[in-house]
């Protein structure tokens, strides 16, 4: 009897270990957790803040909340393209340069599905579509990238993907998404560049986020990289806000913030001034493009609206109203300044109202899916063709 009682704890421990091993095996077979190589595809730059890393080639997780991945490649120049490029433009070739943020860069879709690759297939051999977009960029960084890098490719047409929902916020701050960046002030109607050289926080971030200094932090990193059960359990426990706060309060989990020690933070709080700054940046992008002999085209990217099948709640109506207001403002602005403009809202909304998803349906990703890239590419292609911009000498 005493022997049986003594064995009970051992049997219980063995049962728990067996259950965990069985769950680990099941997850490995049916829901494996992957740690991707090259998790970051940007690198520090003293003028732009960050820049695409050249020769990045591999999978990246769509979101920390999901076990979904997409493949992305940067070519030898850091452009998101399947083929390598040189600054020198081949004889007899017209170049169309796309600049923008994660929409044009193609967040969440594989290389062949990105808008620039779809356009390249439509253009054929006489035109090159170059994708100079960088995730997280605002209009200010896009202007700097165009002047520092983009014009070296001698583009004939510059196409800017403008997503005002976060572009207005991004240009109004010196730190965004946890990274220092350049910004402009409007002084006497002139754009004045600030925060350059951009503070280099690579060592601070490495110590704070990438290489844990505590034993508990190192253990979690080991489990995250070498087991399937830990990431599976952690993601589900952390999704509960009450449990997440409990883990933070007890020190089990860290509350990651965007605070960067020793780095000053600037924020333009006046929305009207931010709008004036946005207008000035768009006009400067046109001026710089045309000054280099390239035509400039502005493309309005609207926010994701709920599909027609979804209920018409206040959030849905609010997004539609926001899109309508942004569209109206941009139409008036581009008309006043005679700026070439593509309004994607009507065509995207028409598909949406027929129940065709052009954005990723998951709440954690509001970017275009492959079909969204295809439709946007068609609109740009048709607009360029109608304007006669694809013909040499036009």
Image (cartoon, rainbow, N blue to C red):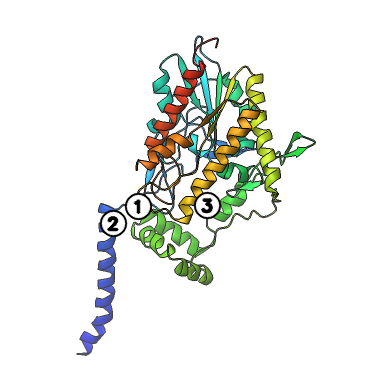
Q: In the picture, which quadrant includes the N terminus?
A: bottom left
Residue 47 in view here: no
Q: Position of residue 340 (x, y in %)?
A: 57, 25
Q: Relative to 218, say whether 147 is above or below.
A: above
Quadrant for residue 184, please give it: top right
Task: Residue at 58% x, 54% y: name it.
Answer: 207
Q: Relative to 170, say whether 85 is above or below.
A: above
Residue indicated by mark 2: 27
Residue indicated by mark 3: 210
Q: Could you say whether the residue bearing mark 1 is in a helix, strand or loop? A: loop
- The label nearer to you, 3 versus 2, is 2
Nearest to N terminus: mark 1 or mark 3 = 1
Q: CA distance from mark 3 to mark 2?
A: 26 Å
Task: Residue at 34% x, 56% y: name it.
Answer: 228
Residue situated furthest right in the rendering: 188
Q: Position of residue 331 (x, y in %)?
A: 58, 33
Q: Position of residue 243 (x, y in %)?
A: 45, 69
Q: Relative to 72, say whether 61 is above or below.
A: below
Q: In the picture, which quadrant includes the C terminus?
A: top right
Residue situated furthest bottom in the rendering: 1
Residue indicated by mark 1: 33
Q: CA distance from mark 1 to mark 3?
A: 19 Å
| Towards the viewer: 41 or 174 | 174
Cβ atoms under marks 2 and 1 closer than 8 Å: yes
Task: Residue at 57% x, 41% y: name it.
Answer: 326
């Amino acid at each position: 009897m005493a022997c049986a009682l003594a064995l009970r704890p051992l049997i219980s421990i063995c049962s728990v270990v067996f259950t965990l091993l069985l769950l680990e095996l099941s997850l490995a077979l049916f829901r494996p957790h992957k740690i991707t190589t090259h998790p970051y595809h940007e690198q520090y730059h003293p003028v732009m803040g960050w820049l695409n890393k050249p020769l990045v080639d591999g999978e990246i997780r769509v979101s920390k909340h999901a076990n979904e991945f997409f493949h992305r490649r940067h070519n030898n120049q850091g452009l998101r393209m399947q083929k390598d490029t040189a600054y020198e433009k081949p004889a007899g070739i017209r170049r169309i340069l796309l600049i923008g943020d994660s929409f044009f860069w193609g967040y969440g879709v594989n290389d062949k599905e990105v808008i620039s690759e779809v356009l390249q297939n439509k253009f054929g051999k006489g035109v090159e579509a170059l994708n100079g977009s960088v995730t997280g960029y605002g209009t200010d960084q896009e202007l700097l990238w165009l002047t520092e890098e983009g014009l070296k490719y001698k583009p004939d047409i510059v196409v800017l993907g403008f997503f005002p929902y976060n572009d207005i916020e991004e240009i109004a701050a010196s730190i965004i998404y946890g990274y220092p960046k350049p910004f402009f002030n409007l002084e006497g109607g002139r754009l004045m560049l600030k925060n350059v050289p951009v503070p280099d926080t690579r060592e601070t971030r490495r110590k704070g986020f990438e290489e844990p200094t505590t034993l508990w932090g190192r253990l979690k990193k080991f489990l995250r990289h070498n087991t399937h059960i830990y990431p599976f359990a952690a993601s589900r426990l952390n999704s509960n806000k009450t449990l997440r706060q409990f883990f933070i309060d007890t020190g089990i989990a860290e509350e990651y913030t965007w605070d960067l020690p020793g780095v000053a933070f600037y924020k333009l709080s006046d929305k009207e001034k931010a709008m004036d700054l946005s207008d000035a940046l768009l006009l400067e992008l046109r001026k710089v493009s045309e000054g280099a002999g390239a035509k400039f085209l502005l493309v309005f990217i609207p926010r994701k609206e709920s599909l027609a099948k979804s209920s018409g709640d206040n959030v849905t109506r609010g997004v539609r109203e926001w899109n309508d207001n942004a569209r109206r403002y941009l139409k008036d602005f581009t008309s006043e300044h005679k700026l070439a403009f593509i309004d994607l809202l009507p065509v995207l909304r028409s598909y949406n109202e027929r129940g065709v998803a052009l954005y990723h349906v998951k709440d954690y990703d509001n970017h275009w899916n492959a079909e969204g890239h295809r439709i946007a590419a068609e609109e740009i292609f048709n607009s360029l063709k109608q304007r006669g911009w694809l013909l040499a000498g036009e």
